[in-house]
């Protein structure tokens, strides 16, 4: 690759000079920004406050005697501090975010605008229902389309994330077994080896014993092992489909049949619903409960501005046990069923204090309505197309974990192709940072050695995919050519160099401490 000289023209590789370290710690136009506690603002304030009219003597021992321990910043200083910090972050608005199983895609600004409308953003959960009829109608409409897209008769909107949805589904399953008098006997939950880590954790949290189900050589549930472990002591199975290896479970109907024959329920992890939305209805596959990450499939990516939302769709058998609240309506308007009585007598309880995350409801419905039925179908088609394009373009240099047949929403590679190079998956990921790309998911799923899991999502253009693929190909060629130093020392161009990740995880420094002898308060 060529570099650029001072007037912007390419420089031949043999003319590249070693870059001297900067004198200030800044790099180009990126400022070297210290922690806010390391600044010089300890003796000032950016706000003029009136002198207090009382001396605080009525507070007794509660009067502060020591400095407050917070630096003072003017408005320009505060703005610059946070803008400089933002420049050190990677963001979906900057480039592709290839984390697998995370669906880090573009978040339409239209949806953000809708979520900020008065009547959605400024309502209070304790307002009289007569004053929030529009919000309740939106919730009811969202519930309708979630049921339509999944082919399921009921939905619980209140869970606030995927794992919270798993908890909801398993508690509904437990309530159903308790109602039939089978709970004391059915104490096991079967979970495949490639499951998301939250699946076995949630099952254990609800009080079940987790039994692992084997995986076949082609990355799918081993149906024979599942059949051998199903029995009258099994409460449920938890299967992700499409699964964490980026593959559709081709035996899903047989898995469902065997599960129901054993008297157990089928919980589906819907984290990857964006790969099949508009194409497949989980209810048609025999699913009894499935959470849907609104903050992934329908608009808002992880960390997209607030709490997530993980509604759970339920089969006819589990619908009576759905948690309160839910929306009902008649000629007099909309209302919430909030107590476990009457029609909600079998509800297992509540999952949160109020109705869930309104902002995510608005974003999700905006996404659905702006796409329409054909657009949602295209979401799945483009997600799958983009992932297979990456797999096809990289498979000659990198080893696909499951090379036979197409993948779904994500392309999964192992580290077989790195053998003999002295470069690891972690080294390769760190070198990606130097090229301006956020690393893909590393070492997950655990069933694939040295896993590199890439999910391009449906919102990336071919041009951006080609830019990412070209960088991956150049790095792969450098690794195979023996350019080990490029990888072992990476990242060279990031604001911070490689950390001791083991030490950072085991001994994190979570509190800033003033240097010894400093007059700054801790």
Image (cartoon, rainbow, N blue to C red):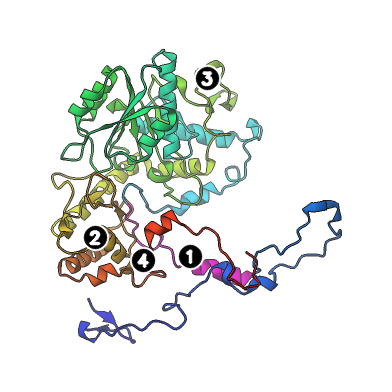
Name which quarter of the figure residue 63 lies in: bottom right
Q: Are marks 2 and 1 in contact (CB under 8 Å)?
A: no
> Bounds of the magenta span?
73-99
Name which quarter of the figure residue 81 lies in: bottom right
Give 129 or 373, whichever is nearer the viewer: 129
Q: In the rendering, at what x and y percent does residue 412 appear?
A: 23, 50
Instruction: Say whether disc 3 or disc 1 marks the residue closer to the N-terminus.
Output: 1
Instruction: Say whether disc 1 or disc 4 marks the residue closer to the N-terminus.
Output: 1
Instruction: Say whether disc 4 or disc 3 marks the residue closer to the N-terminus.
Output: 3
Mark 4–mark 3 distance (CA, rounded to whole Å):
54 Å
Residue 59 as seen in the image, left or right of residue 165: right
Say which residue appears at 22% left-offset and 47% top-offset: 448
Instruction: Quickly name the residue at label 4.
Output: 498
Q: Quick check: is 86 in the magenta stretch?
A: yes
Q: Secondary structure at mark 1?
A: helix
Query: Which of labels 2 and 1 is toward the front?
Result: 2
Outermost residue toward the front in this view: 516
Judge the density around disc 3: few (<14), some (14-19), many (≥20) Cα neighbours within 10 Å.
Answer: some
Instruction: Quickly name the residue at label 1.
Output: 86
- Residue 303 appears in the figure: yes
Mark 2–mark 1 distance (CA, rounded to whole Å):
29 Å
* Quadrant of image for the N terminus: bottom left
Q: Secondary structure at mark 4?
A: loop
């Amino acid at each position: 690759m060529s570099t650029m000289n001072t007037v912007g023209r390419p420089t031949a590789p043999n003319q590249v000079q070693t870059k001297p370290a900067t004198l200030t710690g800044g790099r180009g136009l990126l400022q070297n920004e210290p922690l806010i506690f390391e600044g010089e603002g300890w003796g000032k304030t950016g706000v003029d406050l009136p002198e207090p009219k009382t001396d605080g003597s009525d507070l007794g021992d509660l009067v502060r005697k020591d400095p407050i321990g917070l630096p003072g910043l003017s408005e320009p200083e505060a703005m610059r501090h946070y803008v400089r910090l933002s420049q050190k972050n990677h963001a979906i608005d900057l480039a592709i975010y290839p984390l697998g199983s995370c669906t880090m895609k573009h978040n339409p600004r239209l949806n953000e605008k809708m979520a900020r409308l008065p009547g959605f953003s400024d309502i209070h959960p304790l307002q009289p229902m007569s004053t929030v009829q529009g919000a309740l109608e939106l919730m009811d409409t969202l519930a309708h389309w979630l049921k339509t897209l999944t082919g399921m008769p009921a939905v619980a909107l209140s869970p606030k994330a995927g794992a919270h949805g798993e908890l909801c589904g398993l508690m509904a399953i437990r309530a159903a077994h308790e109602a039939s008098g089978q709970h004391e006997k059915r104490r096991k939950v079967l979970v495949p080896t490639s499951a998301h880590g939250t699946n076995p954790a949630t099952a254990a949290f609800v009080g079940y014993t987790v039994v692992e189900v084997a995986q076949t050589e082609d990355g799918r549930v081993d149906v024979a092992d599942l059949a051998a472990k199903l029995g009258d002591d099994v409460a449920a199975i938890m299967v992700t489909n499409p699964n964490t290896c980026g593959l559709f479970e081709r035996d899903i109907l047989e898995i469902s049949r065997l599960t129901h024959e054993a008297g157990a329920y089928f919980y589906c992890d819907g984290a990857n619903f964006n790969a099949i939305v508009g194409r497949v209805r989980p209810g048609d596959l025999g699913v009894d409960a499935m959470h849907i990450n609104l903050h992934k499939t329908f608009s808002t990516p992880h960390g997209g501005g607030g709490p997530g939302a993980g509604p759970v769709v339920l089969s006819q058998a589990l619908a009576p046990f759905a948690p309160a609240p839910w929306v009902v309506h008649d000629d007099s308007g909309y209302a919430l069923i909030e107590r476990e009585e009457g029609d909600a007598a079998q509800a297992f309880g509540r999952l949160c204090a109020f109705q869930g995350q309104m902002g995510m409801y608005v974003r999700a419905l905006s996404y659905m309505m702006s796409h329409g039925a054909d657009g949602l179908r295209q979401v799945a088609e483009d997600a799958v197309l983009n992932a297979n394009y990456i797999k096809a373009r990289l498979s000659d240099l990198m080893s696909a974990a499951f090379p036979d047949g197409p993948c779904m929403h994500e392309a999964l590679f192992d580290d077989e192709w790195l053998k003999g190079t002295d470069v690891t998956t972690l080294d390769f990921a760190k070198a990606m940072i130097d090229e301006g790309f956020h690393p893909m998911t590393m070492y997950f799923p655990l069933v694939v050695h040295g896993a590199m899991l890439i999910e391009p999502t449906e919102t990336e253009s071919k041009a951006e995919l080609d830019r990412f693929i070209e960088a991956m190909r150049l790095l792969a060629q450098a690794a195979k050519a023996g350019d080990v130093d490029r990888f072992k020392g990476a990242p060279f161009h990031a604001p911070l160099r490689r950390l001791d990740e083991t030490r950072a995880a085991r001994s994190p420094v979570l509190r800033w401490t003033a240097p010894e002898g400093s007059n700054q308060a801790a």
